[in-house]
Image: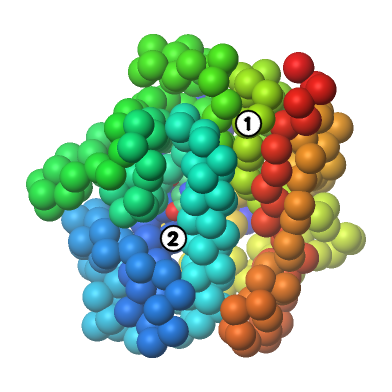
Amino acid sequence: MTSTRYDGDSWDLASSVGSTATMAAVARAIATRADDALIDDPFAEPLVRAVGIDLLTRLAAGEAAPDEMVEQMWIDLAKVRTQFYDAFFRDATNTGITQVVILAAGLDSRAYRLSWPTGTVVYEVDQPQVIEFKTRTLADLGAVPTADRRVAAVDLRDDWPAILRTAGFDPSRPTAWSAEGLLGYLPPEAQDRLLDTITHLSAPGSRVATESRPNPQQGQEDTTKERLHRISERFRTDGFDPDMASLRYFGDRNEAAPYLTDRGWILNGISVRDLLAANDLPPLKDDDLRMGDMLYVSGTLDETTK
Ligand code: SAM
């Protein structure tokens, strides 16, 4: 399978990388209805519905049963991932940080559903069609941001700091940054550039949260691609064609955690495997997608770095 990605490609929430944001919201919608009540994202289902992909709407609404395409693993991963970033922002703002940047926000509704301390400014960065769709749809639903929400509609491979500053971002203030579900969709050098830029724009005391995936061993990526291919085939039979293996950039890249540590960030990490266990969720059945070893990392910029 060849990649459909190229420099400057763009998308809406029904196409290319944009559809991964909609799939993430599907998982949050299903997880929100689960008995364990580990997460609560009331906007996930209406947002998916508004995107208008029939199969994804039915899954999000609980009208189609999850199987290999949206198996329990995806739902459990959505639970631990959402909790991790929710807790990150809660902790960061509890220390007094009032500037938050959600990179690759997709259909994340944190700017509407978390209890942000008064005065918090939340910047959401994503491609223009993604940002415009979410802003319009949530306004139509009568949703009101729970912080001073501002948007930077820009490609993260372009000069996004300029657009962020135009929206009011102040690099002299400590920032809480998240890059959730993003890095694998950036070419390796764009990932490095993004992490360098975050560091450069971070005042002392800033915090960051993201994922750090160990580089694959020989043959592992073929297994991952085959699995993604099978899942895409399954979706295709129901009229949705995400071609998931072609959306990510494969091959070695700098791992995010050591890369950030080398640039002065003091990080803690926990693997997906341990997060599942900590939440009494079942272990991964197989790990063709190499999720278990993926680390969720968060930390603070060393005060002496700047
Ligand atoms: N963070 C959201 C979540 O967890 O639900 C969305 C994750 S989704 C898997 C990937 C997101 O990354 C999409 O919203 C997509 O538009 C965004 N993205 C990927 N590459 C991007 C780029 N070059 N510029 C802007 N956004 C990008």
Q: Residue furthest right?
A: 218
Whether 46 is drawn above or below 30: the answer is above
Kind of residue sitting beneath label 2: Ala
| Whether residue 127 can be seen here | no
**Residue at 76%, 52% in the rendered image:** 268
Q: In the rendered structure, which disc, 1 or 2, sits on the residue that comes first in sequence?
A: 2
* Disc 2 element: helix
Label 1 near ligand 1 (CB < 8 Å)? no
Is residue 186 rendered to the left or right of residue 129? right
Q: Is residue 63 above or below residue 87?
A: below
Q: Is residue 250 left or right of residue 45?
A: right
**Could one spot residue 258 in this view of the protein?**
yes
For residue 92, above or below residue 69 = above
Q: Position of residue 264 (x, y in %)?
A: 81, 30
Quadrant of the rendering where the C terminus is positioned: top right
Q: Crowding at label 1, few (<14), some or many (≥20) Cα neighbours within 10 Å?
A: many
Identify which residue is drawn at 45% across, 75% down.
38
Gap in Å between the C-alphas at discs 1 and 2? 27 Å
The residue that mark 2 highlights is: 24
Query: Which residue appears at 39% of the width and 12% of the height?
Result: 166
**Nearer the camera: disc 1 or disc 2:** 1
Left or right for 166, reference 80: left
The quadrant where residue 249 appears: top right
Q: Which mark is residue 161?
A: none
**Quadrant occupied by the N terminus:** bottom right
Question: Where does residue 102 sit, x and y in percent of width and height?
Answer: 47, 39
- Count of numbered badges drawn on the protein: 2
Q: In which quadrant of the rendered view does residue 149 lie? A: top left
Residue linked to disc 1:
206
